[in-house]
Amino acid sequence: MTAMEQILEKAGTAPADLHKVLDFGCAAGRLLRFYPHTQGRSELWGLDIDAKHISWCQSHLSPPFLFATTTTLPHLPFEDNYFDLVYCGSVFTHITDLADAWFLELRRVLRKGGYAYITIQDKTSMQMLLSRFSTTIADSAQPERDWEKVDGEPGTSSAFLHLINDFNKAIDFCSKDYACFTFATDPYSNVFYDTQFLVDKWSRFAEILSVTPRAYGCQTALLCRK
């Protein structure tokens, strides 16, 4: 949350001044619960496709936060121009298709002048993860390949690091230009973008205010304004 707050402040706004906020892909409210809010003024929503997470959030975090389950299709249960801020931490990293449609849907529910904060995986992310794989090998003769074991960064696990290394060896990723690619299968799919490609495309629909590598673990943050 701190990185997003700093990026918003550099753009000339304070998170506490953004009262209608949507955490898109909130999971168990790991970020939403720490968002600065004002009782009686703030309206903070969390959405996720995982009904178990949303049920837990509704039982333990509501009030003051509001929650709803969504689907994988780009449709949100809100009217146009509703939110001051929509943020997505490690969500577009797992949308294997419909990313553009989801971006436009998030834009729809933002008011004019509202902000979208989106983290993605890119070439910088890949290089960081390959470095982590090398460290893992050095630290352990037999690294675990366990999807459930999170290694401390959003979207990473021992098995994920192995997959990245195997994939990189197969295509020599770091020497190539690309638009985007995906590997692994849902729910463990991972999408990597060419950041400039994404900025050029999405800037047709919103102003891209900043691009910040390593803002969320190994992920790059895009701050957009409608």
Image (cartoon, helix red, strand yellow):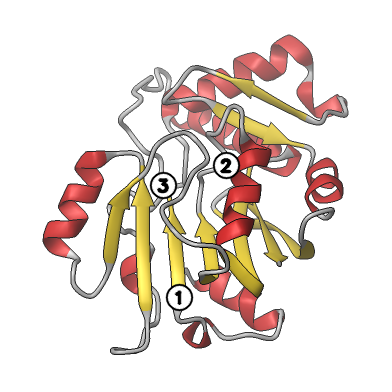
- Residue 211 appears anywhere in the view: yes
Q: Secondary structure at mark 1?
A: strand
Q: Is residue 150 left or right of residue 74?
A: left
Q: Residue 220 or 179: which is nearer the viewer?
A: 179
On the image, the x and y values in percent for residue 56 come to 16, 51
Above or below residue 174? Residue 1 is below
Q: Is residue 23 left or right of residue 60?
A: right
Of label 3 and label 1, which has the lower sequence position? 1
Residue type at mark 1? Lys
On the image, the x and y values in percent for residue 155 come to 47, 39
Which disc is residue 152 wearing? 3
Of label 2 and label 1, which has the lower sequence position? 1
- Residue 215 appears anywhere in the view: no
Q: Which residue is mark 2?
A: 92
Q: Residue 76 or 58: which is nearer the viewer?
A: 76
Q: Label 1: how many residues lie within 10 Å, few (<14), some (14-19) or many (20+)?
A: some
How far is mark 3 from mark 1, CA to CA? 30 Å
Residue type at mark 3? Gly
Instruction: Tell me where residue 183 sits by quadrant.
Output: top right
Q: Residue 5 or 52: which is nearer the viewer?
A: 52
Q: Label 2: how many residues lie within 10 Å, few (<14), some (14-19) or many (20+)?
A: many
On the image, the x and y values in percent for residue 173 come to 77, 23
Q: Are marks 3 and 1 in contact (CB under 8 Å)?
A: no
How far is mark 2 from mark 1, CA to CA? 21 Å
Which disc is residue 20 wearing? 1
Q: Secondary structure at mark 3?
A: loop
